[in-house]
Amino acid sequence: MAETAVIIVIDKLVSLLTEEGNLLRGIHDEVTSIKDLLESMTSFLKDADEKAERANNSSGVKTWVKQTREMASHIEDVIDEYMHHVARNRDKHGLNGFLHKTTHIVGGLFTRHEISLKIQRIKKRIREIMKTSVAYGFNSTQRIPFSSSRRDNMSFDQRMTSLYIEEVELVGIQTLRDKLIGWSIGGEVASRRSVSSVVGMGGLGKTTLAKKVFDNSRFTEWFDWRAWITVSQSYKNEDILRNMITEFHRTRNESVPEGIETMDLRLLIHTLRGYLKEKRYAVVFDDVWSTNLWECVKLALPDNNNGSRIIITTRKGEVAASCREAFFDQVYDLEPLSPDKAWELFCKKTFRDSSGYCPPELKKFATTIVSRCGGLPLAIVAISGLLSTRGGDVPQWRKLHDSLGSELESNPHLTNVTKILSFSYHDLPHRLKTCFLYFGTYPENCPIRCSTLIRQWIAEGFIQEQRGKTLEEVAEEYLAELIQRSLVQVSYVDERGVRRECQVHDVMREAVILLKTRDMSFSQFLEEDSRFNENSRHLSVDSNAYNIFGSIGSSRAHSLCFFNGIGGPQNPLMSCRNLYKRFKLLRVLDFEDSLLDHLPEEVGYMYHLKYLSLRNTRVKILPKSIGKLANLETLDLKQSLVHEIPYAINKLPKLRNLLAYNLHNNKQLGRTTKRAVVIHEGIERWRNLQKLYTVEATDSLVKEIGNLKQLRRLGIQKLARKQGKDLCASIGKMSHLQSLEVVAINGDEIINLQSISPPPQRLQTLILIGRLKKLPDWIAGSSFLTRLDLSWSRLAGDPNTLKVLQGLPILVQLLIYDAFSCEELHFEEGFPKLKELSLIKLNSLKFMRIHNGALPLLESLIIGPCPQLQQVPSGIRNLKNLKYLDFLDMPSHFIDGIQVQETEHHVGPKVIVVKTEGERVMTTKIIDSAVFM
């Protein structure tokens, strides 16, 4: 990966020379000369990397590549330290005075003379490395900028995300899936609690098979109490039981019992047995490595003689055998795909555009490649994802075929898979390599928020600017290509088709990412028994390793992220004082979910810091020194206790994301809303800001945000009626706005957004909480709107209002919360894409009719409380795709009047009757499949 390391440094030097040239005064020529020398090396670095991969560990080529990579990192550190020194002294003396001093006199460790000497030594080292390279006969190749060479690959349709939510296409496991479902809901021993184990090597699709069963409608409708538990190699029995309790309650939208975090093993078992008594439940334990797990969890899973089921996936046959305690317990050995099925899977993934048809000129290459994959789905999917980017280019296929063959012949089993997956990795452009390896900074089996990952990539400098696109948009394209190549899987897509979470397969993480990151000192995940590597560029710390973390003297790390281990959350700074002195080069600092309660003043000295997350911590007050973080791009305060942002932050010109709110019960509005933060006037420097939510409205703020013309998301609360005109004028200047949330100061205050001009044409999400005199006229023209929430609007019963909403062409989610004062609602037509409709607190509603052809794609309908509604909406049988119908706090006469015919053929929606008492939610009635009379 020498090429990647060198190119990153070159790009950084170019940026410094053009944007920060004034700070490099006196060493400008030296920096330029290093850049020129590095550029002369790039012509043969790709070949050097390829030869190093094929060489054995003692090869001189590997040593040469390692030296080159370390040299590039050293250059980056020298420049970073110098820039940090300049920034600190600038703060002390003022820019002009300091520049004069640093140019003409000796001033501390990083004087012009000393930095020049360091650069001279670096240049000498570069020349020595280049001279040595001649002996290895590296071939020169012309460097093609990534932004242009990969542009075609980057034009990935974001709506295709749903294709990649599963680990592999469903090929070759349908029969076993159906067998497992049949075993789950019936069979000869239907009444007994039974265990089924799925055994096979990593990458065969065990998790995919179990997930297909777990998510199947027959399975979910048969088991009302379900839990999916990912185990992994390191686990603690108490944590497994706590996760079971949490999952059982979460799948039923129930509150998790208080105090489970402090329960011991015996009490946790007792709690689970009590909760599951007389219930029919299903649990999946995914990726079990130890025979001891079943010995513990079986004590918490009572045999109620009503058909409960447990599914276990494991790579170890002994684990499956230990779980088989009766003749009706099953063990399924998952075998590699047959040649026919392997070919089918390969063609489906490689030739999507031609419906799986392999051109004759490629068939001989494809046949050999599929054969070499040995029927392992993960390997097939990975290599086909790679080939799908090559199109029908025969020379490219021949080249891949020839190289792949030599890799596969000598490496059986998992090592064979490792080689295949590594081959996909090596084919990545340099920018995607660093992005992909960054997944190694997250724990095993950890779903990663795509938005967080993208912001961290940007902070690390992995994302290259492209004309006409934001860095976030380019990063989305990077992630899309990783998904397209089947190196990354999407683990959660929301109702609107937006990708929310992603992760890498555990085999991919072990076989490629961890191997590469250790070899290159790219990242280290510090755990209880780890030994700290001071050269690691990205450091992640498990809460069980805080003692090791506290002993670190100095680090070259660019990122520092904390994660909760078996022992639960802790305060990472209790064991590590003087964070700044130990980690001077940080760009990313992530305390999310830790017990951090205080952010030290010294954080303000971290000149290079671009990403700071205090999400879900106990921090209440931000230090004023945060205003010194001149490079800060993202400040994440979600679910922290921070309520007021210090004025000093207004000075930060590079800020792109200010994310801050805390969910709380809003007594003024009678519902849960976001508690906003207070920011002070004077935010005109935030010209690069992309996201600002959620903040309290002031007279000055609603005017000043009009200067933030790059905003994509805005959330503003406590808006007074008198501020509406100025807010409209400001929003009219935000041509890129995609999400807008406005909350009135109280339930009686009118939100006046009628005069927005021009209205935001790219708006996708609109949330209005407060009274409306009328629906703003411009909403009718919001053709990109996919989500609309109207709460507390109290609009009069004007039928035109509903007609306007029905005309929104791609609206997917609609929430009406005390928004209409009408006695009747008629859904006659429209809403062509609506999937979720919530009608909450319509106190005047007496009658509702759904005409034939209306709401054609509706899957979920929530109604209530509507105290005057007399009967189930007329025409509800016209909703052919309805899956869930929830009645919330409806009066008893309404519930008693529901006339349905329950059917076993699953032709109707699942009906759920819910009652609430304060914050407690209770499900009082469930009809699995109802046909309305």
Image: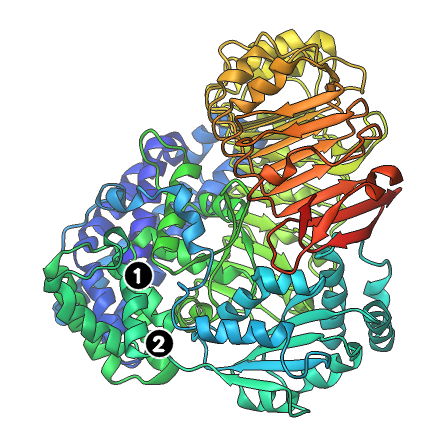
Q: Of helix, strand and loop, which one carries label 1?
A: helix
Q: CA distance from mark 2 to mark 1?
A: 20 Å
Using residue 577 as the reference point, say whether residue 262 is left or right of it.
right
Which quadrant holds the N terminus? bottom left
Seen from the viewer's position, the closer of residues 330 and 504 is: 330
The residue beneath circle 1 is 348
Q: Is residue 783 visible?
A: yes
586 shown above or below 166: above
Q: Is residue 712 above or below residue 574?
A: above
Residue at x 19%, y 62% (from the top left corner): 358
Q: Residue at x 27, y 42 (%)?
A: 147
Check the image and report above or below for 292 versus 361. below
**Quadrant in the picture for the C terminus:** top right
Q: Position of residue 635 (x, y in %)?
A: 60, 38
Tell me if label 2 and label 1 are in contact, CB under 8 Å: no
Which picture quadrant has residue 417? Answer: bottom left
For disc 1, the neighbor class at 10 Å (few under 14, some 14 to 19, many from 20) is many
Q: Compared with residue 138, is residue 253 higher up or lower down, i.e. above or below?
A: above
Say left or right for 3 vs 159: left
Label 2 secondary element:
helix
Please indicate, yes or no, whether residue 621 appears anywhere in the rendered image.
no
Which residue is depicted at the point 28% across and 54% down?
352
| Residue ID for mark 2 | 417
Residue type, label 1: Lys
Residue 886, how many percent across, how many down?
72, 43
Farthest-out residue, front: 933
Q: Nearer the viewer, residue 782 or 711?
A: 782
Residue 377 shown left or right of residue 698 in the figure: left
Residue 106: x %, y % from top left: 45, 40
Amino acid type, label 2:
Val
Q: Residue at x 70, y 35 (%)?
A: 661
